[in-house]
Image: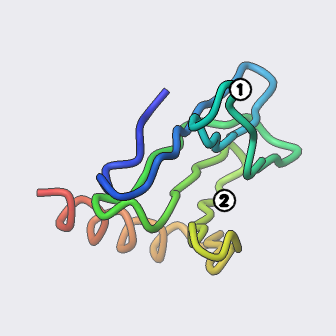
Amino acid sequence: MEFNPDPGVSRVLTTALENVVRVWDPTGPVGREVLQITRDSKLIYATWSPDGRTILSCWKDGVVQLYKTVPWEEFAKITDADEMADRIKQWRAIQN
């Protein structure tokens, strides 16, 4: 479970054993699911970007997906290993 790092946005990212990434709106008496990301592959990792505007998901089949959080949409899918390594380096540079 990971809270969105943007203090102005109430969203929680969770992952599950069934290889699903879910984003929840925890406001109100009962939280509601606002996004679900699934693939026919094992989920390795999922996290928010440092600004909370993007979700990164990494899958065992070698696919890395990036989702914009507003509006909720996939905007990049990477399957090339070199491109994936470059994107991960950029991602880490942003977080540091």
The part of the image, by quadrant, that contains residue 68 is: bottom right
Is the residue marked by circle 2 packed among few (<14), some (14-19), or many (20+) residues within 10 Å?
some
Residue topped by disc 1:
30
Whole-number angstrom distance, CA of label 2 to CA of label 1: 33 Å
- Vertically, is 72 above or below 48? below
Q: Nearer the viewer, mark 2 or mark 1?
A: 1
Residue displayed at 63% across by 30% down? 15
Q: Nearer the viewer, residue 24 or 36?
A: 24
Of callouts 2 and 1, the N-terminal one: 1
Q: Which residue is label 2 attached to?
A: 63
Question: Which quadrant of the view contains residue 20?
Answer: top right
Identity of the residue furthest to the left in this view: 96
How many numbered discs, if any? 2
Amino acid marked by disc 2: Val
In depth, the one of 36 and 59 nearer the eye is 36
Percent position of residue 34, x then y? 73, 50
Q: Is residue 36 above or below residue 17?
A: below
**Label 1 residue SS:** loop
What residue occupies the far top of the structure in this picture?
Answer: 17
Identified by mark 1, the residue type is Val
